[in-house]
Image (spheres, grey):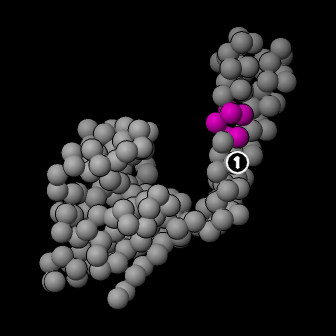
Amino acid sequence: MERIEIYSSKEKSILLLIGSLVFVVLGIFMIINAENPTSYIVRNQLVIIIIGTASVLFFGLGIYVSIKQLLKNELILIIDRNGINVNPKKSKTDFIEWKYINGFTETKIQSQKIIIIEVDNSKYWIEKEKNNIRNKVMNFNFKYYGSPFNLSANSMKISHHELMKTLNENLNKYKYNA
C-alpha cells in the first residue's frame, strides 16, 4: 500500500521567522518613536502606537508558530489508497475517503494558490466537526469556496504544482480506476 506523508517545511518556517522578526522589530520601533512621527501619512501618535502594537502581536504569533514548526517536524497531510487525511494532528482516523471526493480545483486568494477539495455532501462534513472554531472555518470555506476543505502548500515540503499533481494522480488511481 502506497502512503504519502507530507510534512511541514523547515525552509518556509525559517522565512516566516525572519519576516516575523523584522516586523516585530519595526513594530517596537514604531511604539518607541511614536512621539516623533516621521511619516507624512500618519502623524497621530495613538494611531502609530496601535499599528506598532498590532504588528508586534500579530507577527509575534508568527514567531511562535515558526519556532514551533522548526522544533517539530509536523505531519500536515496523509494520502493513501483509502483517502486523504487533511488534519492528521487531530485524529489518525479522520480522513476523506476517495469515494466522497469529486475532484480538486484551484483558486487564488491574494496571489496565494489554494487547492479546494470538492466533496459530496459538504454539510455532512461541517456537522461532523465538533471543534467550534474549525467548524466556523469550514462554514466560511463552504460559503465562499463551495467546499469545507482546502489546502495550501505554503507550509508544506511540496510545491503547489506537485501537490495538485499528486492529489489528481491518486484520485484517478484510487477512485476512478479501482
Q: Is residue 138 above or below residue 51?
A: below
Q: Is residue 160 left or right of residue 13?
A: left
Q: Secondary structure at mark 1?
A: helix
Q: Nearer the viewer, residue 37 or 156?
A: 156
Can you see residue 141? no
Q: Is residue 153 magenta?
A: no
Name the residue furthest bottom.
1
Apparent side of residue 18 relative to residue 175 in the rendered image (left or right): right
Magenta highlight: main SS: helix
Query: How many marks are shown on the rendered structure?
Result: 1
Give the vertical position of 6 relative to 30 (above or below).
below
Q: Position of residue 40 (x, y in %)?
A: 69, 18
* Foreground residue among 39 and 12: 12
Q: Is residue 119 visible?
A: yes
Residue depicted at x 21% and y 64%? 101
The residue range painted magenta reads 55-60
Q: Residue at x 34, y 78 (%)?
A: 80
- Which quadrant of the rendered structure holds the C terminus? bottom left
Residue sitting nearer the eye, 155 or 134: 134
Percent position of residue 176, x then y: 14, 78
Residue at image position (75%, 46%) is: 21
Mark 1 Cα within 10 Å, few/some/many (few <14, many 20+)? many
Q: Quadrant of residue 70?
A: bottom right
The residue lying at 65 percent from left, 46 percent from top is: 62
* Placement of the N terminus among the 4 image quadrants: bottom left
Q: Residue 75 at what x, y percent from top left? A: 52, 68
Where on the picture, by quarter, is residue 103?
bottom left
| 63 vs 16, nearest the viewer | 63
**Mark 1 highlights which residue?**
63
Residue 158: x %, y % from top left: 48, 71
Q: Type of residue at label 1?
A: Ile
